[in-house]
Amino acid sequence: MACDEPLAPAAAAPTPGTRSHRTPSLRLALLAFALTGACEGRSPLPSPDPDAGASDDVGAPWPDAGTSDAGEGGPVSADELDVFTREVWQPLRTDCVACHQSVRAFANDDAHVARDVALPLVRFDAPADSRLAVRSENEHCGVPACAPGSGRRARLAEGIRRWGLARAARPDAGGPADAGPPPPPDYTEFLQCSPARRGSDDVARRLTRAQYVNTLLAAFNEPALLGLNSRAAVLHERTWTGALVAAVGQLPEDGEPHHLAREDARLSDTHLEGLLAVAQAASDYYANQPARLAGLGGPCLTDAAPTEACVRGFIQSFLGRRLLSRPLATTEVDDWFQRYAAGAGPPRERLLELLRAFLLHPELVLGLTWQGPLVAGTTDEQALTPFEFARRLAWHYTDAPPGPQLYADALSGALVADAGVLEAHLDAFVAGNTGTFRFPLAAHHFTFYSFLEQWLDTRTFRGFPSGALAAAAFPGFNFQAGNENWYAEAQDELYGFAFRQVFVERGRYADFFTDTRGEAGPFTSRLYGVPAGLRDLGPARPGVLSRVGFLASGEVYPNHIIFGVRVLRNVLCQPLPAPDPGVLPDNFRDLGLRDAHPTWTTRQFVAQQTSAPACQACHQRINPIGATISRFDGAGGFDRSQGVERIWSTSGPPLVVGTPALDDAARVTLDGQPRDVVGLPGLAQAIAASDEGPLCLARTAFTFAFRRPPTPADACTLVPLTSAARSRSMAELWKGVGRSPAFRARHITPRSP
């Protein structure tokens, strides 16, 4: 491609009878540009202009008026754009630009974004959930210009509020006050298997950030590139050093705006800029240390003029085996070698140009593959090749490319021809190994840990109480001294409990929510009132929901609302819309109300907080579930004070001003039916015996594996997964994903003749 030629979309030719994966033409054009060679001194990506109107990147201020890209709220009208521009965008540009350098930097600067806040910058369907709203309310605590009282933060928050009101006032939007209770989810439609129905997988999904980084680790086997030499370090990017760290850091985090990070299939200009930066950084590293080229394809690559056999071996081993996890066809190797031979410059520069192109290969970045044949007798089922299947297994279970044995079994064909070979690999993916649970032991443990964090939302652990009130409420417990130990133990225990249930004892879904055994460390064992080690914690501590890491609220009192939301959204897969701050009372967070009403329990206080009519659609489901943890305190400890709750003064010295009687009996809705439960043990038993609980786990595991939420058309995959969790074990559910026919094929849309 000449420097003066325009970029044109390009795509690989699909297998006859199939349609290529849908991918934005701009993305393919940029990748095609990268693959055909960039002109010296010219970047294929123009510098972004923050004032240049809308784009599909996260830096874009708004979607085009009249488009349907604005989320559940529907198209954005011109009037709404005017409100947004006047009330939000202008204050952002004038008040925040001093610290954030530019509008675009504000939109993309991860240093100013909490890592655990997975919210889009702007949500037209739910303004209060926008990252802008979160920032304006909760951040900038140490910035004088934006501190409370400066007016700047208040102006932005008020602008977002007005914009939200304008959005909700649309005739077709239906404001929160008009919203009736959402109908109970019809979970039964996910259990009606019809082989004639199949969910579609006809969309390209790039590697996740973790999968891409682990592919780099495996391909280069060069710790100096990333400054790490183990999967353990992948979880701790802040400790990285090395040539690729800055470039990898340009890749956006996965997750927005999804529940599971793997659902994020975005391929924005920011992603491509990061991928190009990684390719260039790797090239620069080997240009400065040419002796290290031997690690990519043998000592012959360090020769001044590598032989044809050497270059062909590099193409086959590095691109084929290490990056794409499959042998390249002879014609593919020929094409790449011809590109090398026809290149300009010394041989080493041409090798590095190949390296840059390899790292931008669409099959690596986007998972674009079309090698598999159509399943016999179908026009819309494309079988995965053994190598595609091996790669899918490895990426799902380990977030990494296939290891030597999995690759060898794909090469021999045994992986798809011999059910015993597949079963042996699935057994390895749920192997417990030996050792301590306090850190993952193998690659598949890291992946399960990631799944657990996202399924139960343990990433948003709120910590332990602090301050004078906490010191009075928890005498002898200094949660801040050695706070990292309290935090680490709370998280370790959650992982250890799940590890033992899934990988060691092969527990069922019911065991996960009712087993009273736990292994607490020397810190958290004090909250449990038992010696450290593996112990029976007693009947008040059933399953994962009762553990300190799930219950601690960061306050003196338990957080009924967050607990209820977690159970409904994460454990039962019941949808909950985002709350509307416009209908909350002004004193919603005013703990001084506890002083004025010392006879209120936390349950009664929460009922008062959420008493607005517009709140009832959701809180009639949230609050009863939250009430079941009334006997626990804000540190996750169990209140054994004879059935009363201590209400503390919030002004003056911390004193107990009331001891109202506790009530943790509640009526909750499960399987579409009301259930009367008493306390957390009653709730845990009800969830364990429900149908929608195991189905929710199966749906979440499906989403994690297929990188999209299931639809009723996926019932034939969900039914055996749900059955495995309920009747056999959660490990069998985890293995069942790899056994499912849907995991070994791709449902496609036939091409028109």
Image (cartoon, grey):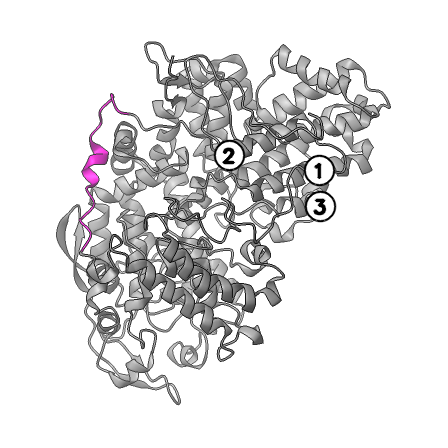
Magenta stretch secondary structure, dominant: loop
Q: Residue at x 39, y 44 (%)?
A: 67
As rendered, which of 576 and 221 lies closer to the eye? 576
Q: Is residue 208 above or below residue 338?
A: below
Task: Answer few, some or many: residues within 10 Å of disc 3's Cα (few below 14, many 20 plus, some between 14 and 19).
Answer: some
From the image, which quarter does the C terminus lie in? top left
**Local secondary structure at mark 1:** helix
In the rendered image, residue 517, in percent from the top left (x then y), is placed at 34, 53
Q: Nearer the viewer, residue 267 or 185?
A: 267
- The three-letter code of the residue at mark 2 reads Arg
Left or right, 308 with reference to 370 = right
Residue type marked 1 = Gln
Residue 313 location, x and y as percent?
A: 71, 17
In the image, is 265 to the left or to the right of 163?
right
Residue labelled with disc 3? 242
Task: Pick whichever, 565 or 403, lies toward us.
Answer: 565
Q: What amino acid is labelled 3 in the image?
A: Gly
Label 1: few (<14), some or many (≥20) within 10 Å? some
Residue 354 position, x and y percent, is 71, 26
Q: Which badge, 2 or 3, is on the more N-terminal residue?
A: 2
Give the CA distance from mark 1 to mark 2.
20 Å
Q: Is residue 223 shown in magenta? A: no
Residue 492 lies left or right of residue 349; in this view the side is: left
Residue segment shown in magenta? 181-197
User: CA gap, disc 2 to disc 3?
Assistant: 24 Å
* Residue 745 to residue 656: above or below: above
Q: Is residue 529 above or below residue 67?
A: below
In this view of the protein, can residue 141 be seen by the observer? yes
Query: At 29% across and 40% down in the image, what residue appears?
Result: 508
Q: Where does label 1 land, which residue? A: 280
Q: What residue is pinned by disc 2?
A: 206
